[in-house]
Amino acid sequence: MDALADVIKLLRPSTVLLGSMSARGRWGVRVPEQPGPTFYFITEGRCWFRPHDGGPVELQEGDYILSARPLSDSFLSDINAQTELSDDAFKARHTVDGEIRVGEEGSGPATRVLGGLIQCDPANADLLIGLLPRLVHVRATEQTGARLRALVSMILEEAGDTRPGRDAVLCRLIEVMLIETLRREAAWAPHAGLLGGLADPQLAQALGHIHADVARGWTVGELARRVGLSRSVFARRFSETVGVAPVEYLLGWRMALAKDVLLRGRGSLEEIAGAVGYKSASAFSTAFSNRVGCPPSEYASHLQAGRK
């Protein structure tokens, strides 16, 4: 089984397009805090991007940015430009024909930025934040950049369509976009967490075994034998790389699956317990309450109340 695909599928990501911005001359725009990860794509021109907690990054046409925790991201014509908050009042003043237009009209070539907010299933939205690096910048010259350009183009086309199945297609496109982005990150640089585990061939095998049979009572020794490592080496490498012990990862994934099923009201407690590796509904309820903070029978209403 593919652990990365499993996690992305569980998140059920979708997108609400934030729209596009056209800018000329000297300008600076600060994006308000967003409720989830946001992607940006430079469809034309060039500019600078500055996250709230980092230095400026130069962007060229075709570049892609994924901001995992967008608290105050800024786009600028140059690194010394002053920024203006892109709130509702700003958008009302600067929106023309459905596009935000800033800077000096008619002054030089335009820079255009397309932005989209990624929304995930509320049961496990925190998994995506934990999975993503703070910032991903994919240059247009990279192979992944070409694939992302094609995906963003399809997302934009599908978002403006009204054909049957539009929402389902958008969700699948966003899933593929995230997988492409995370594949690239796993291959390019060392990361802690699931991405780090997937970059290690032996740990990736172990993660695959867990995801293929989550109900199995996996032990550290059995997983170590499956991937050809000693128990001590496997346990240490898994904990250091993934950030949690193998059994802890297994329990966390079981709870993620259980939360997803409970939120949708599918199956009895006995059925859910068996599917995620517990011998009885009471054992599952105890484990769920300890980790999530409320009994499984109250989970959906508890989650909804917490979001109000």
Image: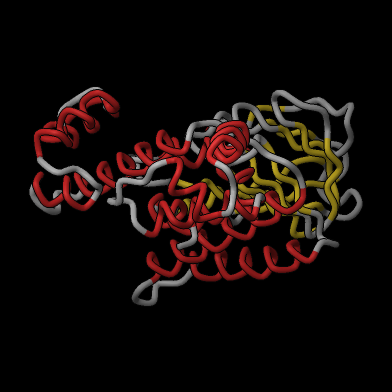
Picture quarter with the N terminus: bottom left
Residue 96: in sight, yes or no? no
Q: Is residue 8 above or below residue 167?
A: above
Q: Position of residue 228 (x, y in %)?
A: 58, 53
Q: Nearer the viewer, residue 237 or 284?
A: 237
At which x and y percent is residue 292? 28, 27
Q: Position of residue 139 (x, y in %)?
A: 81, 55
155 vs 293, nearest the viewer: 293
- Tell me what residue is drawn at x 33 percent, y 51 percent: 214
Q: Nearer the viewer, residue 262 or 304?
A: 262
Please identify the quarter of the rendering in which residue 71 is found. Answer: top right
Q: Quadrant of residue 212?
A: bottom left
Give the number of marks: 0
250 with respect to 95 (left or right) = left
Residue at 73% over, 53% down: 187
Q: Is residue 107 shown left or right of residue 303?
A: right
- The image's colouring method is secondary structure
- Quarter of the rendering occupied by the C terminus: top left
Q: Residue at coordinates 39% horizontally, 77% vertically from top-left?
A: 163
Quick check: 8 left or right of 265? Answer: right
Q: Is residue 163 visible?
A: yes
Residue at x 68%, y 32% (from the top left corner): 73
